[in-house]
Amino acid sequence: MKSTKIIFWVTTSIIVLTQGVACALTFNDSNAIAVFKQMGYPEYFRIMLSIFKIVGSIVLIVPTFKGKLREWAYAGFGIDFIAATIALWATAGKFTPDVLFPVAFMGILGASYVSNQKLQSKY
């Protein structure tokens, strides 16, 4: 039980810090804007995705959010990581090491999800 809690908090904190906090701090950064433009995404998509990442991070890290809402947050991040993998690969036109970053975060998200499920089943 203790190791499950540690795995949950470490993996969830990594997701929250990289997806929520970093997104909140950099979503108006010129580099972030340039990346979205390079991929051909409209401006509103960058803003919408940033808001969803921040809200999803809050849902994952706040213990009072449980059940379906947290499931949707996990699903949203999973879809985001899959879409990021495809977008990075398609934009580069070939496999590059950058494609592995969202794949790695998908693994971290999976560990967070599994540990969350184990913790929820204990209560």
Image (cartoon, rainbow, N blue to C red):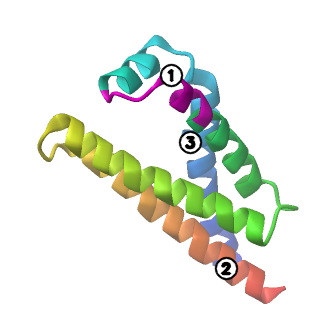
For label 1, the crowd category at 10 Å Cα-Cα, with few meaning under 14, some 14 to 19 and many 20 or more, is: few
Do callouts 1 and 2 mark residues in contact (Cβ within 8 Å)? no
Furthest residue toward bottom:
122
Residue marked by disc 1: 43
Where is residue 117? Give x, y as percent: 67, 79
Residue marked by disc 3: 19
Rounded to the nearest angstrom, the CA distance separating label 3 from label 1 is 19 Å
State yes or no: residue 67 in magenta: no
Rounded to the nearest angstrom, the CA distance separating label 2 from label 3 is 21 Å
Residue marked by disc 2: 117
Where is residue 47? Give x, y as percent: 59, 28
Where is residue 51? Give x, y as percent: 66, 35
Q: Which mark is residue 105?
A: none
Q: Dot 1: what SS?
A: helix
Q: Quadrant of the N terminus?
A: bottom right
Where is residue 70? Give x, y as percent: 72, 64
Residue 61 sits above or below residue 37 on the image: below
Seen at 34% across and 27% down, the residue is: 40
Seen at 45% across and 18% down, the residue is: 33
Label 2 amino acid? Gln
Q: How many marks?
A: 3
The residue stretch that appears in magenta: 39-48
For the residue pair 53 and 3, the one nearer the viewer reads as: 53
